[in-house]
Image: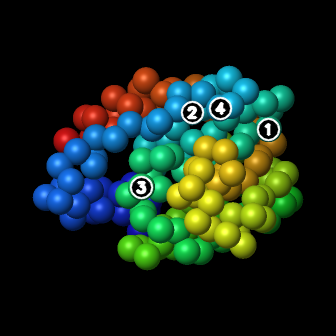
């Protein structure tokens, strides 16, 4: 099941309990060092420094997933294409695929997340990032949403 579908289901299930859960915005518009963060409609994010993208899932997605208990991340050296499934997350609620927001070669995976998946819930933008990828097509970033567009997407798509 795709992360987006799982997030939608989680929102539908919890809508009666917490009416505003599906309207939560991501909490930060930039990374710690002020690089922009870009988002997919499947709730992955990427920030880029010198053509190397750091990838994770949004605060909205980790909140919808619930407690993450397992993470399978792509191996270093693996080549991924934009939109391609490249890993998986399991939570107490569901299992979900991870899709790469950009094309390129994996340069690093966050071993700490594989050993302690709850880092995603604790700090999805800092300690809980998933992997790094050397971009082969930096122009793909233009197809992603910036923070403002992502916030609008969340508001429109999850009312």
Mark 4 or 3, nearer chain start: 4
Disc number lying in front (4 or 1) = 4
Q: Crowding at label 1, few (<14), some or many (≥20) Cα neighbours within 10 Å?
A: many
In the picture of the structure, the residue carrying the numbered disc 4 is: 31
Q: CA distance from mark 4 to mark 1?
A: 14 Å
In the picture of the structure, the residue carrying the numbered disc 2 is: 38
Mark 1 or 2, nearer chain start: 2
Task: Write the residue at 82% across / 54% down.
Answer: 108
Judge left or right: residue 95 versus residue 153. right
Q: Crowding at label 2, few (<14), some or many (≥20) Cα neighbours within 10 Å?
A: many
Q: Toward the viewer: 147 or 134?
A: 147
Task: Write the residue at 45% across / 38% down.
Answer: 26
Residue 159 is drawn in which quadrant? top left
Q: Toward the viewer: 57 or 18?
A: 18
Q: CA distance from mark 1 to mark 3?
A: 26 Å
In the picture of the structure, the residue carrying the numbered disc 1 is: 52
Label 4's element?
A: loop
Up-down relation of residue 4 to residue 55 (above or below): below
């Amino acid at each position: 099941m795709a992360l987006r579908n799982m997030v939608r289901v989680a929102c539908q299930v919890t809508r009666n309990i917490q009416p505003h859960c599906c309207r939560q915005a991501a909490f930060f518009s930039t990374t710690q060092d002020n690089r922009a963060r870009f988002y997919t409609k499947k709730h992955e994010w990427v920030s880029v420094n010198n053509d190397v993208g750091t990838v994770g899932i949004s605060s909205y997605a980790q909140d919808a997933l619930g407690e993450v208990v397992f993470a399978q991340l792509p191996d270093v050296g693996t080549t991924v294409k934009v939109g391609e499934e490249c890993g998986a997350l399991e939570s107490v609620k569901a299992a979900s695929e991870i899709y790469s927001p950009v094309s390129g070669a994996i340069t690093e995976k966050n071993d700490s997340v594989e050993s302690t998946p709850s880092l995603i819930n604790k700090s999805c933008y800092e300690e809980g990032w998933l992997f790094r990828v050397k971009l082969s097509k930096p122009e793909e970033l233009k197809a992603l949403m910036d923070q403002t567009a992502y916030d609008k997407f969340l508001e429109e798509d999850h009312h």
